[in-house]
Amino acid sequence: MLKMAFTGDCIATSEPKNNYFDNNKVIELLDKCDLVSGNLEMVVSGNKSFASTYCGGEWLTIDEDDFEIVKKFGYTYLNTANNHTMDYSYSGLKITNEILDKNQIIHSGSGEDLHRAEKAVYKKINGDVVAFISCTASGDDASRAGYSTYDMPGRPGVNMLRHSEVIYATSEQLRAIDEIAEQTALNARFLKSVKMGIHTLDPKIHRLGRVQIVEAEKAEKKTYCNKDDLNRIIASVEQAKKHGANYIIMNAHSHDIKGETDDTPDDYFIEFAHQCIEAGVTIFIGTGTHQLKGIEIYKNKPIFYSLGNFLFADEYLKYWSADFTEKFGVTTDISSEELWNLRSRNKTTGLEFDEMNYKSIIPIAELTDGKIIKLYFYPIELGFEQKNGKSKGYPYLADECTKNGIVERLKVLSKEYKTEFKDLGNKVEIILNN
């Protein structure tokens, strides 16, 4: 039998309090598993790499010595495909992956070219071969890895799942949109490129700059996977099966949402998850918006649309780029405390002030003979209120009241998938459709 644990986003630029690791129940729980998986959402290059002109929201990097904090949770595997992977450009990516190799933590989702970024990595445990594939649907397009050719090197970066967004509008709304486009010449450059043969113009599509709009009976937004990326990533799943993997884990990072809240997956992400399961993925792990999303049992395989945060201690940064301070109109010699006050508007706003970003779960799967035989999770909280000396942003097993709140929220988020849960005391079973 194989026992796997999965965690959400790992961001730890701020250290925990001195006693955090004493008799740590979360680490005791993870230590009982054969394999621990997570999403490394920061760079481990310290001040050795220059910053990219873009970032995943803010430029996140730590020193190699500070990575010891992450290592204490016993990770076997870390996903390195997300919107922060290229915060410190190509060298930051290279140094981070080299440090993971040095610490014998397998990783996937990024590399020196797309061949490396898209391929599965493998771990043999208890006679079983587990394959890990990862990709991100969020991040600057400049972070996207590219293939090499017979005479050109590939482009370093992440395994990107691109997607398109189509806006539907009524005929009345489209008349107003076309009028705005004409009066502002917003489409002028694109229309010129059509005349030059660079782009084509679909008469069914109305444009407002880069936004594509199609006539429909009602206004709505729909998103779709890029077919080339979808087929390419599914091919990696097929390759893992040929390699002899008994279990295949897909890690996918997405910040896109269907509605106005951070707890609903977008259409294309659901499409992608379903395609992965149909291709042979055993467990689909989503991350991205720092909050829990619903759980779906699809063809008797679990889809976790987002595990939220596992480590979310980013209030204080040791390093930052000139671009970062430029955003706030201050000089680079500002202190970390002063920068935090600017970022948070004097500790009043930001992701760090939404309690939902500090409640999550640790799913555990027990597998044998190529099948999941048990699936359950432990609710956790990340010390949001810092009661009883807790370290904000670091995981603790949830007390009864907090656990019940997390479970009830998951039930609501998973209702449309008809997912069933069973309370087992300090953990909660996810019912499989055996």
Image: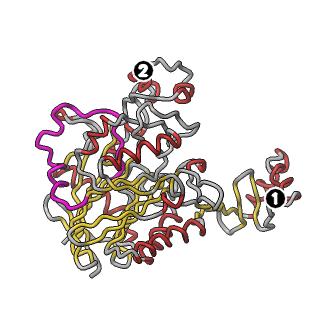
- Tell me the distance, in whole angstroms, between the alpha carbons under discs 1 and 2: 48 Å
Mark number, residue 386: none
Q: Residues within 10 Å of mark 1 (few under 14, many from 20)?
A: few
Provide the residue designation for mark 1. Answer: 198
Residue extending furthest toward the front: 151
* Residue at point 25%, 40% (across, down): 383
Q: Residue at x 18, y 31 (%)?
A: 18
- The quarter in which the N terminus is drawn is bottom left
| Image position of 15 with respect to 395: above or below | above
Res 129 quadrant in image: bottom left
Residue drawn where x is 34% and y is 56% of the image: 106
Q: Position of residue 327 (x, y in %)?
A: 56, 28
Q: Which residues are magenta?
A: 8-35
Q: Can residue 35 be seen?
A: yes
Which residue is at the front of the view, 413 or 337? 337
- Amino acid marked by disc 1: Ile
> Horizontal and vertical percent for residue 166?
65, 62
Under circle 1, the secondary element is: loop
Choose the circle earlier in sequence order: 1 or 2: 1
Q: Which residue is mark 2?
A: 338
Identified at 41% across, 26% down, the residue is 340
Q: Amino acid at mark 2?
A: Glu
Disc number lying in front (1 or 2): 1
Res 212 → quadrant = bottom right
Q: Is residue 169 magenta?
A: no
The answer to which of 50 and 289 lies nearer the viewer is 50
Left or right of residue 2: residue 53: right
Binning the other alpha carbons within 10 Å of mark 2 as few (below 14), some (14 to 19) or many (20 upward) gives few
